[in-house]
Image (cartoon, rainbow, N blue to C red):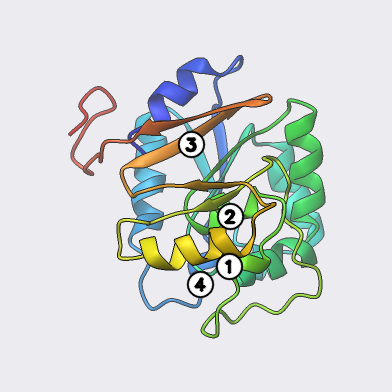
Amino acid sequence: MGAFPGWLDELSRRPRHAALVPTAANPLPHAPWVPHIARQLRAYGISVDYLDLERATPTMVATVLVGADLVFVTGGYPMFLLEQAQRTGFLELVRQQVHQGQLAYAGMSAGAALAGPDLALYQSPDDPGNVRDSSGLALVPFCTLSHVNRGRRTHYAKIITAHPTQRFVVLTDEQAVVIAGDRWQVRESLLISDEDSPQRVM
């Protein structure tokens, strides 16, 4: 979230209404990052509507997205998120609206994975998601490997070696990748506490 204000300032149209998608975290016992993100969005003057894809219908998804100019997808289980995104038509609607310039997309962890071309690499035995097609939003031409600083360097190195034709962006918890058109850049993303205002970054 530390890179978020700079990204907002660079957008041609500053978002005012966000659809916050917490679905990837639903199978987890606790997801403190979800309310944290909601608070940060509101601190930047962005209103927040929760859009839980697990409990949504395609009509509900379409209605919420019509009123949003930003969708923020949080972390958790990537394949579970993808299953619900497929079932509700979220994938098609978001892809279309982003390409048309009607919607800005931000994702964290599983939400970042969803923005890529394919999520097959994120499958794990503990992920309850079940899909036949692992295609993602394809908003970016690479797969994001998040949380490398959490002891995942060796695992990620094996993934990259096993897929020499796939493009990857590897990020620590203090980094973000910012995309504008065909250009992208990895930036440092300093952590922001709940007590910080938008102007104070720790």
Q: Nearer the viewer, mark 4 or mark 3?
A: 3
Question: Considering depth in this image, is 158 or 34 the residue closer to the camera?
Answer: 158
Residue receiving disc 2: 113
Q: Nearer the viewer, mark 1 or mark 4?
A: 1
Are circles 4 and 3 on residues that touch, CB within 8 Å? no
Q: CA distance from mark 2 to mark 1?
A: 8 Å
Label 1: how many residues lie within 10 Å, few (<14), some (14-19) or many (20+)? some
Q: Helix or strand or loop: what does disc 3 sit on?
A: strand
> Which badge, 1 or 4, comes first in the chain's sequence?
4
Give residue 113's quadrant in the image.
Answer: bottom right
Q: Which mark is residue 57?
A: none
In the rendered image, residue 121, in percent from the top left (x then y), is placed at 62, 66
Give residue 44's quadrant in the image.
Answer: top left
Q: Which mark is residue 122?
A: 1
In the rendered image, residue 34, in percent from the top left (x then y), is placed at 41, 56
Residue receiving disc 3: 177
Are circles 4 and 2 on residues that touch, CB within 8 Å? no
Residue receiving disc 4: 26
> Which badge, 4 or 3, comes first in the chain's sequence?
4
In the rendered image, residue 185, in percent from the top left (x then y), is placed at 50, 28
In the rendered image, residue 156, in percent from the top left (x then y), is placed at 46, 62
Query: Residue at point 35% right, 43% down?
Result: 39
Are circles 2 and 3 on residues that touch, CB within 8 Å? no
